[in-house]
Image: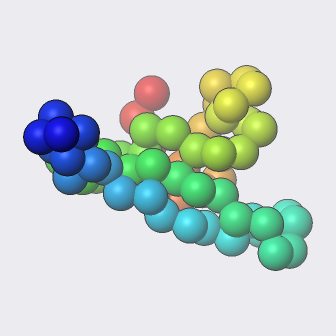
Amino acid sequence: MANSEAKSDRYETIMIESKIREGVFHKVIKNLESGKAVSCSCKCWSKGNKPCIGMRTIGYSG
């Protein structure tokens, strides 16, 4: 239990509305230690491993 709690304390999920598709939100995972985005729910990231606009808005270092 303590290990999963420690992991959840290091990350935050941020919802960012898509600029292209109205009503669609990116679920960006942000590392609280670095302040950078590490993952997103969108196709750009999940299929192509490319940072989306939501990730770039928060900050991404690849």
**Looking at this rendering, what residue extends furthest in the right direction?**
21
| Residue 10 spot, x, y in % from top left | 22, 47
| Residue 54 spot, x, y in % from top left | 60, 56
Residue 23, by quadrant, is bottom right
Count of marks overlaid on the render: 0
1 left or right of 16?
A: left
In the picture, which quadrant includes the C terminus? Answer: top left
| Residue 2 spot, x, y in % from top left | 12, 40
- Which color scheme is applied? rainbow
Which residue shows up at 44% across the image and 58% down it? 13
Which residue shows up at 58% across the image and 56% down it? 27
In front: 49, or 29? 29
Which residue shows up at 45% across the image and 49% down it? 29
Residue 61, by quadrant, is top left
In the depicted structure, whether residue 14 falls above or below residue 29: below
| Residue 32 spot, x, y in % from top left | 24, 52
47 left or right of 35?
A: right
**Looking at this rendering, what residue extends furthest in the bottom direction?**
23
In the picture, which quadrant includes the N terminus? Answer: top left
